[in-house]
Image (spheres, rainbow, N blue to C red):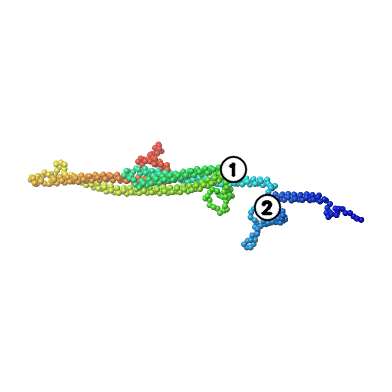
Amino acid sequence: MRVLAHPAERSQDTRIGAPAWREAAQAMSRTAHILTDRCGQEAVTMWQPKDSVLDPNVAHHLGRAAYIQPWRFRVEMLKGGSTVEKPLPGEGVTLWKGKMKPPAWYARLPLPLHRKARALQTTEVVHAHARGARLTAARLGRAQHQINGRVRQLLRQREVTDHRLSEVRKGLLINQQSVKLRGYRPKSEKIPDKADSMLTWEKEELKSMKRKMEKDMEKSEVLLKTLASCRDTLNFYFKERLQAVDLMNQPLDKVLEQAGRHSWVNLSRAPTPRTQGQKTPPPDPVGTYTPECALALNEAKRLLVESKDTLVEMAKNVVDVREQQLQISDRVCASLAQKANETLELKERLNMTLGLMRGTILRCTKYNQEMYTTHGLIKGPLLKVHLETGEKLDRPLVRMYQRHVGTQLPEAARLAQGTDKLQRHITHLEKNLDELLAKHKNLTWGLNCKNIGHEVDSSVVRLRLRQRQPHVCYEQAQRLVNDWDPRTPPPRSKSSTDP
């Protein structure tokens, strides 16, 4: 019997479903598969960095091996021939067991801990700002402390300079006292000499020193005001920065120690062998280290350098002025002492001359008296009744001999001539004696003047040595100049007159 086959059985495709239906299903499946792969790839790509996306044309295991190859440790050869594996430099997590160091991973989308991470980031920003404010406050505080120290040094140096200025002014008063005291010498001792020139020279030098010290005082006063203004500015910014670190209990010195910098202003600190500390950050108008703070610190740095030079110059000027004033005073005292010694030598010579003249005057006076006695003996008595017989010119022997005209005796003529010659000699001797007495009086006056001059110069030297002692202040020397007069006794104090 003949069997008839179904047309479908005669074809090679044994599937019952229609091809269109099957293709529709396959297309739907392919579309779903492609969508699944794309969505899965996009989901993974969102969580992975861009360079971690594998090439779709390369097998997965080969692409992964090529991707992680740069993460593996590098093998380095040592000198002895051995090898050592070292991780790559840079950021990342070192996996010592797998001998790999993957780079840092950065997500493209917020992670589940995004809120906490943002809170931590905010905390870090706040802490960084607080640390910056604290560090800036520490710098400002240390700069203020150094400015305060420099102000104290400048004040102490001003006291030293003011004391030296007082000594210079006292030196001027001593010079004035010396000139005033030497003005009471006799007129013969006021002839200008080298001592007067030395006193004038000392006055000019002391005036020059006074101007120099006053200039230093004015300069230091201006610098002191500038330092005080800078200190107030630093204090204002210091308190302003401290408002951000009220709740952070940490000493500011510890902050500077952690920063590796003892100070951002002090230039005299010796370098330490430690690692270099943090550098000064650039000024930021909206940050903690504002341009105003930078300007204040730079101004403090400039003032510290300038004040240091000023202090050195003031100290040097004080030492130079002190030595110069002492040398000038010693030279003036030496000249006055030499003038007193010269006056003493002249006084001794005048005293010797006065002694010799006194002996000559005594001898001349005695000889004059003898001449008067001789003149009286030769001239004879004043009355005739006092004459003896042998002394009369009309005695009998003479009258008998002179009866003749040509037999006159020369006794009367010789007596008259001798008396006249003796009288002239007595007159000349009295004239010489008057000259000796006048010269003796002049020498006595000159000796007294020399004595006064010697006493005055010696008193000036003693006065200068006593007044220049440190315990004698300016006011005492000023009272001595204004109130004291050597020609009058010092006034009695009120306490001495009170009952």
Tag nearer the camera, 2 or 1: 2
Three-letter amino acid code at disc 1? Answer: Gln
Residue shown at 35% from the left, 40% from the top: 488
Query: Mark 2–mark 1 contact, CB under 8 Å?
Result: no
Residue shown at 52% from the left, 42% from the top: 229
Give the camera-side residue of 480 and 57: 57
**Could you say whether the residue bearing mark 2 is in a helix, strand or loop?**
helix
Q: Is residue 129 visible?
A: yes
Q: State the residue lying farthest toward the bottom.
A: 81
Q: State the residue lying farthest toward the right.
A: 1
For marks 2 and 1 on the same chain, the one whose residue lies earlier in the sequence: 2
Q: Is residue 252 visible?
A: no
Give the camera-side residue of 166 and 493: 166
Task: Please state, as top left, top right, bottom left or bottom right, where the N terminus lies in the image.
Answer: bottom right
Task: Please state, as top left, top right, bottom left or bottom right, where the C terminus lies in the image.
Answer: top left
For residue 477, what is the image quadrant? top left
Q: State the residue lying farthest toward the left.
A: 404
- Relative placement, left or right, of 30 versus 470 is right
Three-letter amino acid code at disc 2? Answer: Asp
- Relative placement, left or right, of 357 versus 164 is left
Q: How far is the residue under mark 2 from the one under mark 1?
A: 47 Å
Res. 51 mark: 2
- Residue named by callout 1: 243
Q: Residues within 10 Å of mark 1 (few under 14, many from 20)?
A: few
